[in-house]
């Protein structure tokens, strides 16, 4: 049985699609006819009761959510593809650190900006939630900027963490001075395998 990824164009499932493609895994992609920032069809709750994308059905038929967890899982499932450092190494510890950091700080900021109604019942507070989310995301990106070890986050070798972080970098709405993040993102855009997937989701951003 193959993997089955549910996503919508331009959403966070891009990075999972890139991971599955880099792994040369057999997978089916279902893209929902829905724009980011809008509710998903109620019928999708039959697949994921939380109504969340991306959703990944594993080869054994079980359902996986949370893109950061999917990246960690896929890197472990395909060690020969070097999607992440070997477990037990200090590099792997850094890989886990930055994927979780991105999930907690960057993804959360994107969600707060796009879905402020999830965080307050006061419509007058929506603008404040959005502006605080943009500020916080910029602060988190600068933490990553200061910790990039080489061309990529962990040094000379690209990992799934780089693809994940590049996606957030182009999602940021504020202005920041981050030349290393810019160079990292350019490398992801021009990657022979990831680049075409990037352009299908994000165009020339």
Image (cartoon, rainbow, N blue to C red):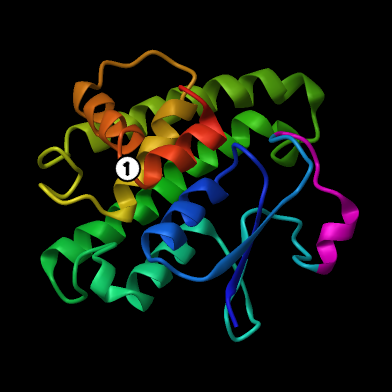
Please determine whether, in this image, residue 43 is positioned above or below residue 32. below
Q: Nearer the viewer, residue 56 or 199?
A: 199
Q: Which residue was labeled with disc 1?
A: 192
Residue 75 position in % (x across, y down): 34, 68
Q: Of all residues shown, which one is farthest toward the right?
A: 43
Q: Does residue 82 appear to the left or right of 6 in the view shown? A: left
Query: Which residue occupies 30% across, 40% down?
Result: 191
Please determine whether, in this image, residue 72 is positioned above or below residue 142. below
Inspect the magenta stretch and tell me whether residue 184 lies in it: no
Residue 204 position in % (x across, y down): 46, 22
Residue 154 position in % (x across, y down): 16, 50
Query: Which residue occupies 71% across, 34% down?
Result: 37
Q: Say what secondary structure mark 1 lies in.
A: loop
Q: Quadrant of residue 33?
A: top right
Q: Which stretch did the figure color magenta?
A: 37-46
Q: Nearer the viewer, residue 22 or 115?
A: 22
Q: Does residue 195 appear to the left or right of 127 in the view shown? A: left
- Within-10-Å neighbours for mark 1: few <14, some 14–19, many 20+: few
């Amino acid at each position: 049985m193959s993997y089955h990824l549910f996503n919508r164009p331009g959403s966070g499932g891009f990075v999972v699609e890139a991971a599955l493609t880099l792994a040369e895994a057999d997978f089916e992609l279902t893209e929902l006819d829905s724009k980011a920032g809008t509710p998903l069809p109620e019928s999708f709750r039959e697949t994921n009761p939380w109504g969340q994308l991306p959703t990944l059905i594993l080869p054994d038929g079980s359902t996986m959510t949370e893109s950061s967890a999917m990246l960690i899982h896929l890197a472990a499932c395909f060690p020969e593809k070097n999607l992440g450092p070997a477990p037990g190494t200090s590099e792997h510890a850094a890989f886990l650190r930055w994927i979780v950091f991105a999930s907690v700080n960057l993804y959360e900021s994107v969600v707060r900006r796009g879905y402020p109604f999830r965080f307050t019942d006061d419509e007058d507070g929506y603008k404040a939630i959005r502006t605080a989310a943009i500020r916080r995301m910029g602060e988190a990106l600068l933490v990553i900027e200061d910790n990039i070890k080489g061309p990529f986050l962990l040094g000379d070798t690209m990992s799934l963490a780089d693809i994940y972080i590049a996606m957030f970098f182009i999602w940021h709405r504020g202005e920041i001075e981050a030349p290393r993040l810019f160079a990292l993102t350019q490398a992801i855009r021009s990657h022979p395998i990831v680049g075409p997937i990037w352009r299908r989701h994000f165009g020339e951003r």
